[in-house]
Image: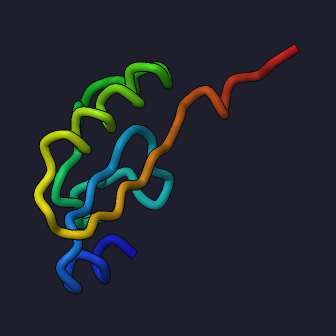
Amino acid sequence: LSHSLRAAGYETALFGVAHETRNHQALGFDHRPAAGQAVPPAPELAAEFEDFLRRRSERPFFAQMGFFETHTPYD
């Protein structure tokens, strides 16, 4: 999806976890904040996305968000 949208002129960004591949470069996103680092907790990830929204261009965008907390076992 990111490849198709980017080819159509969208600005693309990946925040957090992506399960499609371990090679996130292959996913074709324009932006990947904190690439290569541990996935931050949801509030920090949301802050990164907010920062992206403030600094982005006027192009349409696609942002994929993957929160680690959805994989945490809960009692």
Q: Position of residue 70 (x, y in %)?
A: 66, 33
Quarter of the picture containing the N terminus is bottom left
**Vertical relation: 70 (above or below) 9:** above
The residue sitting at 33% across, 71% down in the picture is 2
The residue sitting at 23% across, 60% down in the picture is 29
Task: Give the total of numbered labels.
Answer: 0
**Vertical relation: 21 (above or below) 71:** below
**Vertical relation: 28 (above or below) 48:** below
Foreground pick, 45 / 38: 45
**Vertical relation: 39 (above or below) 23:** above
The residue sitting at 50% across, 53% down in the picture is 19
In the image, 21: left or right of 49?
right
- Identity of the residue furthest to the top in this view: 75
Q: What's the coloring here?
A: rainbow
- Identity of the residue furthest to the right in this view: 75
In the image, 29: left or right of 69?
left
Quarter of the picture containing the C terminus is top right
Foreground pick, 52 / 1: 52
In the image, 6: left or right of 55?
right
The residue sitting at 16% across, 59% down in the picture is 30
Q: Position of residue 68 (x, y in %)?
A: 55, 30
- In which quadrant of the rendered view does residue 57 lie? bottom left
Q: Position of residue 35 (x, y in %)?
A: 22, 37
Q: Position of residue 5 (x, y in %)?
A: 30, 78
